[in-house]
Amino acid sequence: MKSRIFLIIGLLLTMGTGCNKGSNSDASGTFEVDEVIVSSEVPGKIMALNIEEGSVLTKDSIVGYIDSVPLGLQKAQVEATIGALHQKTMDVGPSVKLLKDQINVQKAQLADDLREKARTENLIKADAATTKQLDDLNSAIDVLQKQIAVNEQQIKVQLTATGTQNSTVMSEFRPLSKSVSVIEDQLRRTNIVNPINGTVLTKYALAGEETTTGKALYKIGDLSVITLRAYITGTQLAQVKLNQEVKVLVDSTESSYRTYTGVVTWISDKAEFTPKTIQTKDERANLVYALKIHVKNDGYLKIGMYGEVKFK
């Protein structure tokens, strides 16, 4: 009879231990991951979006593109406008060359007249020439000097006028060039570039749909290292420090845990009220401190899964 009683008591103890698993954790929380929502950078029709939920993508890979034809047409139109500007500008070169050639001829004639003037002055001294001849030479020299001055002034006027006109026309060149650069940047943004290494968590759009700037296309997160957000009481703060290794326990079966090594990467410096879904070691505590623990994921850990922590 005593043996049967001891057997029954042993079975009851075994059942009780299997249900409770005896984790006696110091903190608990749920797993989360840093998520990145990839949005469209330009409006237009989605021509391709080669992803599916669960797809593993690499950083900087092109996973689709937006219709770029409208932007290409805009660029061609602006470039045509820039080309037309050059046709509106004036080339003052031929006019200036003609005036300079005239000045060179006039200067050559002036040099001849100056030599003739000197010769005539000598002849007058020898009573071999008249003063009228000298007066005629002086008059011709004066006319040539004035013609040279006028032509030189015309060159300056033409250069100034043409420069002003060309500057007015070409003042449109810089903003138009900036417009081309903006359109080229938008054309680059028609490629949908994946920003991080990770797994597609949610897909929000399909090829063939119209999208707008900032509209979400898909959500991606790096599941190779997953974060356990847990909560501890103020009295437990002394047990925890940054970069500390801790033991993370996750349900495996009804009577066992999967054990992982985690690293504390963040401890909140502000207390908050205990989340309703979280139980701490001291359930009477009203204020708790959040902490983040990075755990290397073996593929078993999922977002939203419940985990418990033991401080080593």
Image (spheres, rainbow, N blue to C red):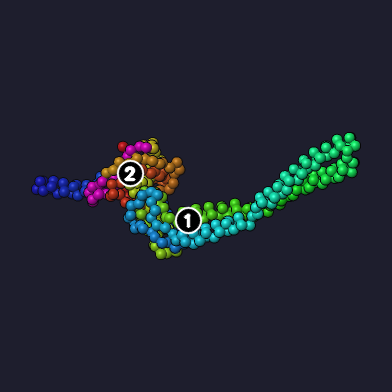
The spot of residue 250 in percent (x, y) is 28, 47
Q: Residue furthest front?
A: 128
**Which element carries disc 2, helix, strand or loop?**
strand
**Which element carries disc 1, helix, strand or loop?**
helix
Q: What amino acid is at disc 2?
A: Val
Q: Is residue 292 above or below residue 185?
A: above
The residue that appears at 38% across and 44% down in the rendered structure is: 292
Mark 1 touching mark 2, by CB under 8 A? no
The magenta-colored residue range is: 243-258
Describe residue 53's horizontal placement relative to residue 161 as left or right. Answer: left
Q: Which residue is mark 1?
A: 187
Residue 62 sits inside the magenta stretch: no
Quarter in which the C terminus is drawn: top left
Q: Which residue is mark 2?
A: 295
The spot of residue 100 in percent (x, y) is 71, 47
Magenta segment, prevailing SS (helix, strand or loop): strand
The spot of residue 299 in percent (x, y) is 28, 49
The residue that appears at 79% across and 45% down in the rendered structure is: 144
Q: Is residue 198 above or below residue 114?
A: below
The residue that appears at 42% across and 64% down in the rendered structure is: 209
Front-most of residues 276 and 152: 152
The residue that appears at 40% across and 49% down in the rendered structure is: 60
